[in-house]
Image (tube, grey):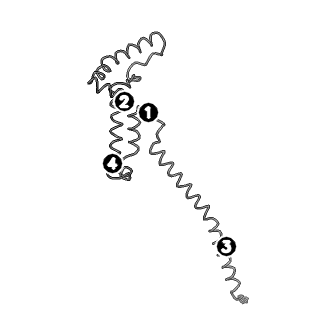
Amino acid sequence: MTQLELEQQLGGLFSLLTVEFLVPYLNRKLSVAQKTGEIPRLPKGDIVKPTIVAGINALGRGQDRESLAQFLTVIAQTVGPDAIAKYVNTDEVIKRLAAASGIDVLNLVKSMQELQQEQQQAMEQEQAMMMQQQAPQMAAVDQKREQAMMQAEQQLPPEPPIA
């Protein structure tokens, strides 16, 4: 909120300071910290790349988050909350909200495969519980069938001996 207010009041000066001042300042600080041994040397190339999380970058992420929240709110109010579940990819919404907040979702948000596995396990557990509940009923049916067969055998006249 402070960054947004600064951006509005200073008319873009805050964004300009981020690009023109903060980036060179950060590069210089990193260079000095590496030379003095305060931090280990960063690998060359694009393997490790420092990112500024203040200024225009943070403003953009905050704007993305607010726009997404507003979009979802309008959908829920206009068409109904069921429409969100039907038409919006909730997995992507969660990823975008996390990105807008500067949160890495790696190993934090479950993947679609993990969700499907959990759903399948839940279904298997439900089926197992149903089988356990039905086991006494099935045993009673089997017992009644055996009793009926025994009664039928007892009611049959004895077979004459074959000579």
| Residue in front for this viewpoint, 111 or 69 | 69
Cα distance in 3D space between marks 2 and 1: 22 Å
Which circle's residue, 1 or 3, is located before the other in the chain? 1
Which circle's residue, 4 or 1, is located before the other in the chain? 4
Cα distance in 3D space between marks 4 and 1: 27 Å
The residue pinned by badge 2 equals 1
| Residue in front for this viewpoint, 66 or 42 | 66
Cα distance in 3D space between marks 4 and 3: 58 Å
Cα distance in 3D space between marks 3 and 2: 73 Å
Disc 4 marks a residue whose amino acid type is Ile
* Badge nearest the viewer, 1 or 3: 1
- The residue at the point 53 percent across, 52 percent down is 122
Q: Is residue 160 above or below residue 53?
A: below
Say whether marks 2 and 4 touch (CB < 8 Å). no
| Residue in front for this viewpoint, 61 or 151 | 61
Cα distance in 3D space between marks 2 and 4: 25 Å
SS at badge 4: helix
Q: Is residue 84 left or right of residue 153?
A: left
Q: Is residue 131 above or below residue 93?
A: below
The residue pinned by badge 4 equals 75
Say whether marks 3 and 2 touch (CB < 8 Å). no
Question: Whole-percent x and y of residue 113?
Answer: 46, 45
Disc 1 marks a residue whose amino acid type is Asp
- The residue at the point 41 percent across, 41 percent down is 94
Disc 3 marks a residue whose amino acid type is Gln
* Badge nearest the viewer, 2 or 4: 2
Question: Whole-percent x and y of residue 130?
Answer: 58, 61
- The residue at the point 33 percent across, 48 percent down is 75
The residue pinned by badge 1 equals 104
Dot 3 alpha-carbon crowd within 10 angstroms: few under 14, some 14 to 19, many 20 or more:
few
